[in-house]
Image: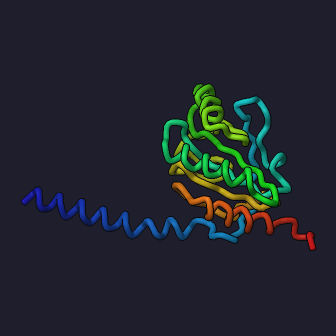
Amino acid sequence: MAALGRSLLVVTLLGLSACAEPARRGAEPPLGGRTSAAAFVYTTTTGEELSSRTTRGRATAIVFVTTYDLASQLLVRRLEQVVRSQRPRVNAAAIVLEPPKYAVMAEAFRTALELSFPVAMADQGIGESGPFGVIDRVPTLIVLDRDGSETTRRAGVVSEGELRQALAAASERGFALDP
């Protein structure tokens, strides 16, 4: 009888969590959504600055990753392919959600995957709040428009087509005074 009660509890909890998932997805800004500009500053593995100031003026794809996750590796490779062919030009960066002591691993990640865009270490870990709010899954893609406002947020691996669409939409947004 106790086993039956535990089974019902597990099924109920699973059902509730399944119902909660669409609500979480609904909270993500839709393609074309708009939030206020993000203010961020990170140091890349090569010692350069990656910030809202250095990315302003172009659509920017930021991917939050871990170095040991295959899905993270797949998404950054897809992003690399898109960035190389994207017109108009866009910015891209990877933010590694691992302790700073693993910066050597992050640089090896960038080198091994032959990434042309910067890789930086975050000052927060998975599930902690930072300049982009809580990132609770990796990989997570965030696309910013030319002003630095978030237009897209997607958790998991996205296709090259979705990347292109999100970056194209973000490239058309921002700088309200533009004709």
Residue drawn 64% across the image and 47% down it: 130
Who is closer to the viewer here, 92 or 130?
92
On the rendered structure, is 44 left or right of 67? right
Who is closer to the viewer here, 75 or 55?
75
Identify whether 73 is placed above or below 47: below
- Farthest left residue in view: 1
On the rendered structure, is 73 left or right of 152? left
On the rendered structure, is 144 left or right of 158? right
Q: How many numbered circles are shown? A: 0
User: In the rendering, at what x and y percent does residue 30 appear?
Assistant: 62, 70
Residue 73 location, quadrant: top right
Quadrant (top left/top right/bottom left/bottom right) for the C terminus: bottom right
- What colouring method underlies this structural image? rainbow
User: In the rendering, at what x and y percent does residue 15 appear?
Assistant: 31, 67
Identify whether 149 is placed above or below 127: below
Residue drawn 51% across the image and 55% down it: 156
On the rendered structure, is 159 left or right of 88? left
Residue 19 location, quadrant: bottom left
Identify whether 118 is placed above or below 28: above
Residue 117 location, quadrant: top right
- Farthest bottom residue in view: 179
Quadrant (top left/top right/bottom left/bottom right) for the N terminus: bottom left
Residue drawn 52% across the image and 51% down it: 136
User: In the rendering, at what x and y percent does residue 124 appear?
Assistant: 60, 40
User: In the rendering, at what x and y percent does residue 133 appear?
Assistant: 62, 53
